[in-house]
């Protein structure tokens, strides 16, 4: 593997000012990372280049057979201008697990990490610093063979693009309302639910549209076999605090193993808070929601970090949680994790990787 | 909706000669159809233009969230040089059912049909005429918003590309060996299995690779809930002739409603052959395979039309079918459907649409 080649832009774009609130995922920086793959040759020509459009054959396999993988993580700038990544090793590991399920060639871990650092380093002036903002990093691979027919592609492109982002929810850290879905299914054991790939997200749209129409901002999925056990939210894992115990669905093969989820579980253990990863039936949740033992509920994900949940709705049952307020533990997780991400609190060994 | 604008190429490519056998899905014609969509504006600017690369933002939603739909059908040229499409109305209907599941805006049926005719007409000299060859037509839609975040795209591109093709299986009309999958799952009720979209195909790759390694050319899927009932093959529906009765899985919500499947069922009814669409357990198939009542087995799909199956394998059970020969009824379906497609046999009302 050669070193990463760096070609800087000659016409930098204007950066978003600090005055307008940043939205999520609409603005991209001056550069991107790119690397190609060919069977027999492996991954080659890693490079940071000016952000540019892709020239693609209409027959490219990614347009037809969905062979694509993505990741999402963030870079933060500290008060003293250091640039930090949060647990990038976890995203790299997960990317390769996704790749393997999707028959996409694995990306050498060291190259992946170097690529993240290189592109973030080049565009570090794009990292916003207002509270709640950060630089969202989107690594992704697409299948590029110009071929119609179902088989793994022989060529791929790996890219990393960067987007300065504000709060994921325009409403900020406010409790969201969540719709428990009983008609559509996102994923099933033996399928691709564990992988971070487009097919899982397009599968979720119809339900999401329905939930939005009813005034709910996210969908909570049930398992595809029994239609009974809690899985995860659109782009977050889900946690409940019931009777003093933090519970979250176990990684059963059809949910995404979230990095934030893993971090919350680690913090529970460090703090001595009882935490259980196990099968959770929707009946248990409805019961806890109604009998007052559901103390808190929150989603975990890179985009919003911790999202307090203020209401769960299942069929005709509406379960308000926390009386419109953010739960105490929920707030503590938010403060701690964002504190670690910003270098203000020291977290467990290895959680923070500095870009130099 | 305006009329379809036609812009012809000034540098036509060389067509594949009649000497080399055509492969599947590797060569594309001189032109393509293109039409764009924007929320508030609808579908606009339908056009036949020279085949060209697409310029795409790396943030285009199709690369990340899998919002894409495709179809597949064929055009044939008759001895007297007429150009025929086989049941395009069925593909158009199915495309819009897929679109609706995937939150992609529907395409007006008349525009879709006009588009098919217009692009095939312009490139009709590309339709090969040797036995077993045809012009494969690939309509598809991709989400084009340059946006990271999970929601339906506000912009789309609908395209139709054309590829002169030979036999789908390099081996021609020979019995294929099929692997019944018991580890991976393709789709589940409530998911997107009924829609023709990339996510279903990428989900099938790992299993397909495993089956290939074992010497099997296709995978037969079991349902995702009970892991017990027969669903369909990679890119085909499946039929069995057991004890004189033709049986195929019913359209239960997780399999693709094939046009060829529908045609075979219609022909059975016309010919007075008993045909059943119903739940079929893998146990029933293993039993019939072993006790000699499994008389024939074949797959149905646009690419290969009818594929005789010569062996089914489930775990350690190998079930040879038909002693290496193509079943009588299988052959009759192949001859009849390809005969109708080529205009040599007159089929049911409306199955053939001429391009003028
Ligand atoms: C389906 C799904 N579940 C959970 C998560 C949370 O994972 P993480 O904490 O790694 O961001 C995400 C994405 O970010 C997701 O897309
Ligand atoms: C998954 C799947 N099943 C079945 C079929 C057969 O459908 P049709 O006969 O319309 O080609 C196809 C595609 O062609 C397919 O991709």
Image (cartoon, coloured by chain):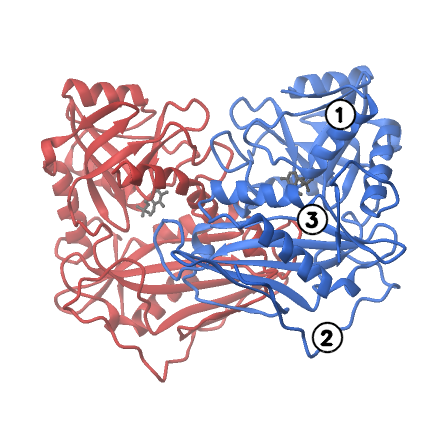
Chain colours: A red, B blue
Q: Chain of mark 3?
A: B
> Real-space Cα distance between discs 2 and 3?
24 Å
Write down the residue under mark 3. Answer: B73
Does any atom of ligand 2 lie closer than 8 Å to the CB of label 1?
A: no
**Would residue A284 appear left or right of B350 to someone viewing this image?**
left
Q: Residue at x 35, y 40 (%)?
A: A208
Q: Which label is found at residue B12? A: 2
Is the shortest distance between ligand 2 and the CB of mark 3 under 8 Å?
A: yes
Chain letter of mark 1 equals: B
Tag 2 subunit: B
Q: Secondary structure at mark 3?
A: strand
Picture layout, residue A229 above or below residue B47: above
Residue B235, quarter of picture = top right
- Residue at (31% x, 23% y) in the render: A282
Residue at image mark 1: B240
Asked whether residue A346 is in view, the answer is no
**Quick one: label 1, few (<14), some, or many (20+) residues within 10 Å?**
many
Q: Looking at the image, is A191 positioned above or below residue A140?
A: above
Q: In front of the other: label 1 or label 3?
A: 3
Instruction: Give the secondary structure at mark 1.
Output: strand
Give the residue drawn at x 17%, y 49%: A171
User: Dot 3: within a 10 Å radius of its alpha carbon, few (fewer than 14), some, or many (20 or more) residues?
Assistant: many
> CB of mark 2 within 8 Å of CB of mark 3?
no
Q: Classify 10 Å Cα crowding around label 2: few (below 14), some (14-19), many (20 and above).
A: few
Mark 1 and mark 3: Cα distance apart in space: 24 Å
């Amino acid at each position: 593997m050669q070193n990463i080649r760096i070609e800087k832009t000659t016409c930098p774009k204007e950066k978003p000012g600090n005055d307008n609130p940043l939205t999520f995922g609409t603005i991209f920086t001056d550069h991107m990372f790119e690397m190609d793959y060919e069977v027999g040759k492996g991954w080659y020509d890693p490079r940071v280049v000016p952000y540019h459009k892709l020239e693609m054959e209409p027959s490219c396999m990614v347009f037809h057979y969905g062979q694509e993988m993505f990741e999402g993580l963030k870079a933060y700038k500290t008060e003293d201008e250091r640039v930090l990544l949060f647990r990038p090793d976890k995203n790299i590991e997960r990317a390769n697990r996704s790749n393997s399920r999707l028959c996409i060639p694995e990306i050498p871990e060291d190259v992946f990490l170097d690529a993240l650092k290189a592109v973030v380093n080049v565009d570090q002036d794009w990292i916003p610093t207002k509270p709640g903002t950060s630089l969202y990093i989107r690594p992704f691979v697409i299948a590029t063979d110009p071929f119609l027919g179902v088989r793994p592609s022989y060529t791929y492109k790996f890219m990393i693009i960067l987007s300065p982002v504000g709060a994921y929810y325009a409403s900020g850290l406010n409790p969201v309302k969540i719709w428990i879905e009983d008609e559509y299914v996102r994923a099933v054991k033996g399928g691709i639910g564990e992988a971070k790939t487009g097919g899982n997200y397009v599968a979720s749209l119809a339900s999401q549209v329905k939930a939005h129409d009813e005034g709910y901002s996210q969908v909570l999925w049930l398992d595809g076999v029994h239609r009974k056990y809690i899985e995860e939210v659109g782009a977050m894992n889900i946690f409940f605090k019931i009777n003093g115990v933090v519970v979250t669905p176990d990684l059963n093969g059809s949910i995404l193993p979230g990095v934030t989820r893993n971090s919350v579980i680690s913090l529970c253990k460090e703090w001595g808070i009882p935490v259980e990863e196990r099968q959770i039936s929707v009946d248990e949740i409805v019961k806890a929601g109604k009998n007052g033992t559901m103390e808190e509920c929150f989603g975990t994900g890179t985009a919003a970090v911790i999202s307090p949940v203020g209401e769960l709705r299942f069929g005709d049952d509406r379960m308000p949680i926390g009386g419109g307020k953010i739960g105490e533990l929920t707030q503590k997780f938010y403060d701690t994790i964002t504190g670690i991400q910003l270098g203000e609190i020291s977290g467990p060994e290895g959680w923070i990787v500095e870009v130099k």
